[in-house]
Image (cartoon, rainbow, N blue to C red):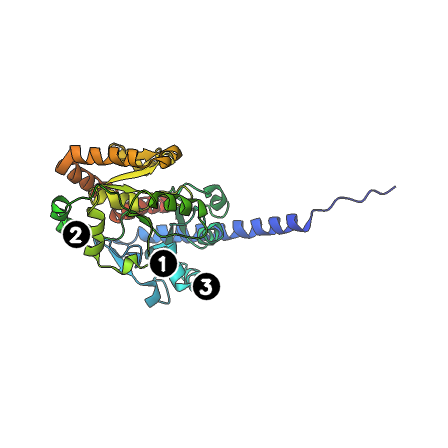
Amino acid sequence: MIIAQETPSNSQYRATAENKKIAQWNQQKERRRLFFSNNMQLREDTRVYLSEGIFSQTEKMNQIERISLKAIENFEADTIYILNNNDIVQIGMQKYARMFANQPRAHVCIWDFDNHHKVSDSVKFALFSDFYIPCHPHNNETYAQMTAAMGAPVSAAVIQWSRAYLEEHRDHFLTISRDTEPLGRHILYPQFPERNAMLEGLSTHFEHVGPAPQTYHRRTELDRLDEWAAHMSHWIIPTRNDLPIRAFDALITGGVPILPASLKELPALSALQEHLFFFEKSDLENPRVITEAANAQFCSQGEAGVIARHELAMATSHVDMRVQEILAQIYRHLNLAN
């Protein structure tokens, strides 16, 4: 009797073929890395471009400049690019992938703000980049299967005001009258119903916490700064347990953030702990209790507390600091000693 051999399923064949393609693609990216690294040793300076959008408020320094992805059709050789996933979406993945493939002598890093929930998009960013850096500690095992060139997560940071603008308006934080009612305006997204329900619940307790219009970034810098600096405390409600930018916006304008307790152990918050309040789900039944505690700390620390929070956030939590973190990872990845 002849027993038929069991053959792999079509899905197994597809998985094997896909893994082979990923391995070949990573080999090609490693060749790009080695070539770029060796070439860097022959040059005194390597230009770094940041994509306009997320990086619009970064400081221009040394060889670091900003570039509009909409205004270019090709990457330059022997140049490092640090791009954000949101900025790439603005020009379309097809255009970006073409630019990436057509310039093997560039080194392109993507800082992915949405790796905690846009998994299919993040997989593409991990594949089509020389170096991939997630923003959140979510789904990273999946992305590590796509690329051998992946860095450690780099948290979001203050992106809506430049350091120079904040320094110019420092006295603003000290002289403005602060409301005891907390601020917590968040844009509602249909894919996050639990978060939306939490905000709707908080809005029944607080006038300035709840849904926000999607026109926020059309307002002037000063108008936005006035709003943030006019409150003692700030409710911060994440999407899928991420660390929102608004936590750092609150600190850099001198306020006290109130965050979910699930975020307490995140590395990006380790140096900020003494200025943070954390809530449990049970606190949402009577959110005024923890709000009053945060306001009491604000009042007891007074002007010194405002300055301390502002200066600490400036030193640790502005986008300029994140650029330096990302560059340090890129240089370690390139390994100039090759």
Question: How many numbered tags mark residues here?
Answer: 3
Distance Cα–Cα, label 3 vs label 2 = 36 Å
Q: Earlier in the sequence, mark 3 or mark 2?
A: 3
Rendered location of residue 55, percent (x, y) = 29, 55
Residue 87: image tag = 1
Q: Dividing the image into 4 quarters, which one contains the C terminus? A: top left
Q: Secondary structure at mark 2?
A: helix
Question: In the image, 19: left or right of 78?
Answer: right
Residue receiving disc 2: 164
Relative to the observer, which residue lies in front, 207 or 97?
207
Residue 291: image tag = none
Please name the residue shown 43% across and 48% down the image. Answer: 115
Rendered location of residue 149, percent (x, y) = 43, 47
Q: Amino acid at mark 1?
A: Asp
Residue 336 visible somewhere in the drawing:
no
Residue receiving disc 3: 94
Distance Cα–Cα, label 1 vs label 3 = 13 Å
Q: Nearer the viewer, mark 1 or mark 3?
A: 1
Residue 200 visible somewhere in the drawing:
yes
Q: Is residue 244 above or below residue 59?
A: above
Q: Is residue 4 above or below residue 275?
A: below
Relative to the observer, which residue lies in front, 187 or 265?
187
Q: Amino acid at mark 2?
A: Ala
Query: Marks 2 and 3: in contact by CB < 8 Å?
Result: no
Rendered location of residue 271, percent (x, y) = 26, 34
Q: Secondary structure at mark 1?
A: helix
Q: Dividing the image into 4 quarters, which one contains the N terminus? A: top right
**Structural crowding at the residue carrying mark 1, measured as other residues with C-alpha within 10 Å and reported as few (<14), some (14–19) or many (≥20):** some
